[in-house]
Structure formats: structure tokens, C-alpha cells
Image (cartoon, coloured by chain):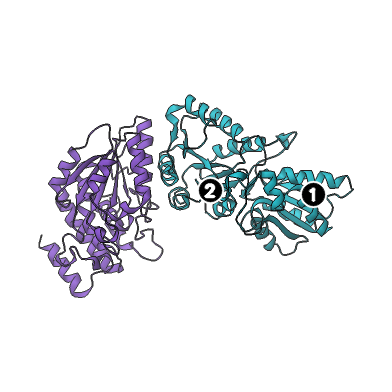
Amino acid sequence: MRNSVIAQLEKLAEIDENIYLLTGDLGFGVLDNFAITYPNRFINAGISEQNMTAVAAGMALENNTVYTYSIGNFPTLRCLEQIRNDICYHNANVKIIVVGGGFAYGQLGMSHHATEDIAIMRALPNMKVFSPADPDEAVEVIKYVNSIQGPCYIRLGKGREPRIHADYGNYSVHKVMELYKGDKIAIISTGSVLGEAKKAVEELKSYDINVGLYNVISIKPLDEDSIKNIAKQYETIISLEEHNNIGGLGGAISEVLSGMSSNKAVLVRMGLEDVYTSIVGSQDFLREYYGLSASAIKEKIKDYL
Amino acid sequence: MDSKELALNMRKDAIDMVNKSHASHIGAVLSVIDIVAVLYSDIMNVNPDNPSMYDRDRIVLSKGHAGIAIYTALAECGFIPKAELQKYYTDGSVYSGHVSSKGVPGVELSTGSLGHGAGVACGMALSAKLKNDTYHIYTIIGDGECEEGSIWEMALLANRYKLDNFTVIVDHNKMQAMGDCEEVMALGDLSDKWKAFGWNVIDVEDGNNHEQLREAFDKRVQNKPNIIIANTVKGKGISFMENNLLWHYRDPQGDDYIKAKQELEAN
């Protein structure tokens, strides 16, 4: 995902000389080509995320499009007030790209597990929040965020995520994407954990159990109309995210549902149950451990059939 | 209007504003007013008729609680009508206690949380440097503000990129919200600290003396970021406010207000 994104950013930088990329001393091997191609527009701001973020705001206020890059919690939580006061309040044109969304850096420990970032970024006025599931989605997100003015948060996995969509061309960054129509239960997923949901849904299909599967790339703004339609069509919505159950996609969906005068669906949130990860492991292991694997999703669905 | 007259008018405006609004921070405002007055009067290329002209010099007040110093400078220099100052602290106004860029022409950045403005100003300077723009970026920080880690992150980057289009001025009045900087955090020798970070350090013995401030700006060098450490007096210009922490919080009313005005009128 990250390589596709940076390659796309290089293409955009070729066209627009006001694009800058700042890193908090991370991206070894990933950012090299950008740095070599555009040495004057690549800034290693050092291990200092607060300043990187403030500097990005200052550069953006001088009519530049500025990307910051680092691992999950560092260019977000570490410098939250710089994002709030310097970027978001001034609607500065800064795009925060993180790698390591959820458990992508599973073995590295809780410091490197981004599991509250969506909730926190989503709470900031002017900030838009994107959580692509695969490299194709991520590239579309970068094209889109570069075309608009104002702060954006782009939550990536790391590398080598499989392509989920055979043909991405029919989808849009903004619209909730329908992968499968179902009968009573619909999963609404965000991020690369969509792969687990797809596996679960496809396996259940072989037992004639039809579960709807939907994907959200833009968590903020959220395609509320589609969420409302799904809520009217199904009895149960399962929100799925590699993130705390508070304030993320499940939180965003619950905000929509609570505003409906009548809806059919009950919301079940599948995410971290308000805990920090206290063990390490591969992303697959942690998904299994914290109940976000395909098998866990199937079990959850059986509870609501 | 020369810088001394500008500073005097700003002080008179400031006393009226805090008296009317019951605002805090007059001590910090009086401390920094001379620096701001010299910048607007003698140093910066700014244009009240075109406050957002591309090649203007930028000023970011990182110690945003002294916002009155910027508002009064803008009013006295014709960026905003003087009547606007009446709106300070009032319901529905954009004139917040901490300086606001929203709705106030000539203000580059809204600040208030310490340790932010200097980093943003550094970003403005980096952008100008990378684009070979010739304008200059100024930021004013407090000495207590130097306790923020983000200030030293900024110091590293500005040195790394040799931002000689960037001048930081420290309003070094030796006091912060809860006491003397030395007692609160053993702030030590600021000149030595900034020198150690690679900056061209210019010490100003009397940071409320306009001639000394002007000379300091002449001592800037190329190939390094510049910092002027202006040894100021908190509450400068009103005898009973000088070096008295109480006036970080208190606003002059009754006899205090009359006495403050009399002292300024006697200039």
C-alpha cells in the first residue's frame, strides 16, 4: 500500500511543484525515489513530530500542498495539538499519511499499533479521514486528497497488502462500496481487514448464507445516505475495523443510525473492546487473538443469524 | 510616527483595552510592545493597504497571550480601524485574548498554546528558502515558552536548513505564569543554549530600548538562523506593574487605571 501511495505522490509532484513531503525520519527505502527525484521538496524533519507538523502547517499556509509521513501514532497522537491548532483550525493544506494502521506492525508492540487514531482524527473539525483497504484504494485516495484543499488523514497498512478488488474502476472514494448483497446481516468494514470479511462472507456463501459486505474508504465525510439505506435493508449491521470500538467506523455508523427516526438494523461493533494490545504477533495472529479474523467474523455472524 | 511614539500609543491603547475588558496578561503585553513597535516601524516590509501582499515580511506572535501588542500595532499602523480595538474580549468578536488571524488583517497565525507559532513560522521560512523568496519571517517567543520541547525541535530544523531568512526574538522578561523562570525551571543562560543549537545569538541588554533593538537587527548574519534575546522588563512603562507577576493576571481598575494612564501621559 505504502509503495503504491508514494509512487502516486511522485507522479503528482511531477505535475505540481508546490507538493512537499516531510517525514519524521521514517520511510527508509520507501521514500528514496521521491527524495532523489525531488531533493528540494523532500524534508526529513527528524524525530520531532511536533515540529514536523507545525512546519508543515507553515509551509501549507504559503500555498503549498504538504504531506507528512510516519508510523501511525507518531504524526497524529504525538502532535495532536499541532494538528488541531496549526493545521485544522487554519484549514492548512496538510495531508497526514501514516503507515501501520491497526496491527500492521504487530510484532513491534502497542506503541506501534494505531488503534485509536481514526476516532481522534475524526473528532477534529476540517479534518477528513480515509482508510483504504488495498493498494488500488490507497492510490485513489491520494489522487483525491491531492485534488482538494484542507487537512486529510490517510491511514495505510504497510506493504504487500493483497489487492482486494479485481476491478476497482467501478468504485469511488466517497461512496460506501457494495461487494456483496446479503439477506439479513451486513458487514461494513474499513481498512485492510476487509480481506478477512471478504473471506468470511465467501466461505458462508458456500453454505447458502448470504451476508452483505460493504466497504468504507472515507470515514469522514461518511456516505450517510448509503449507511441509512443499508440500515433499512438489513436486520443487523456489523461494523468491522482494526481499531478501538469507540469512535471509529462503528462510532461513525452509530451516529448515523441514532439520527434515523426509524431503522431496521441493530449495530454490532467488531473492533478492539476498549483495550490496548498487550501482546505482540503478526497481523494475522493479532486479528485472530482480538477476534477480527475471518473465523471470528463467521462466529459473530452465526450469533445473529 | 516613529517607533517610540508608536510604542507609547500602543501602551495607551493596551491599558484602555485591559481596563475595559478586564483582560489578563498586561504585564506580558507591556514587556513585548517595544519589540513589536520597532518591527512594525523600522524593520518589517508590510503594507497596511495590502496586508496579504506576497512578498510581505511575516510576523508570528508565538506567545499569543500578548495578542494586544499585535492588535494595537495593527490599529496604530492602519491595518485595522482603531475602533476595532473596542471589540477585544467582547461577545461575538474575533478579537480573542490570544492573537487571532481569523478576521484580523495582518495577523498571520492564531496562537495561544505555547510552542506552536515558532514552528509554523519556521515552516514559512523553510518554504521561502526552498523557493528563493526574499521576504523574511519573524517570530516572537517568550522565555518561559522555551520550556516547550517543540521550541528546541524547531531550533534543530532551522539550523539544519540554515534559515537565515528567519529571526526569532525572545521576550526575555525572566518571568512566567507561576514565578521567575529561574525558580520554576532553572532556565539558565538562554544565549548559551541557542548558541549550542547553532544559531547566531544577538543579546540585547535592554530589550525595551529601541536603539538597541534596531542595532540588534543589524547584527544578523547569513547562513544561520538568527535569534535576538531581548532582556525586557515585564510590565514595562507602568512603574507599579514592572517586574510584578501580579500583572500577569490583574487588570488595572480605579486608581490603578488612573495612575497607569497618568504615567503614560507624562511621557
Q: Residue B156: x and y, percent?
A: 35, 40
Residue B188 in the figure: left or right of residue B154: left
Most distant residue in the bottom direction = B254
Farthest residue to the right: give it.
Answer: A208
Q: Colour of chain B?
A: purple
Residue for point 34% across, 46% down: B152
Answer above or below: position of B240 versus A271. Answer: below
Q: Residue at x 61, y 54 (%)?
A: A278
Q: What SS does tag 2 mark?
A: loop
Return the residue at label 1: A212
Q: Can you say whether B100 is above or below B52 in the image?
A: below
Q: Is residue A172 above or below residue B210?
A: above
Q: Is residue B95 visible?
A: yes
Q: Position of residue B258 (x, y in %)?
A: 17, 71
How crowded is the residue under tag 2: few (<14 C-alpha within 10 Å), some, or many (20+)? many
Answer with left or right where residue A219 lies relative to residue B258. Answer: right
Q: Are marks 2 and 1 in contact (CB under 8 Å)?
A: no
**Residue at 38% over, 61% down:** B93
Query: Residue B31, located in which quarter of the rendered image?
Result: bottom left
Q: Earlier in the sequence, mark 2 or mark 1?
A: 2
Residue mark closest to the camera, 2 vs 1: 2
For badge 1, the amino acid type reads Gly
Residue type beneath disc 2: Asn
The quadrant in which residue B126 appears is top left
Quadrant housing residue B30: bottom left
Counting from the top left corner in percent of width and height, residue A127 is at 53, 49
Mark 1: secondary structure: strand
Tell me, yes or no, if residue B52 can be seen here.
no
Q: In the drawing, what numbered circle is on residue A73?
A: 2
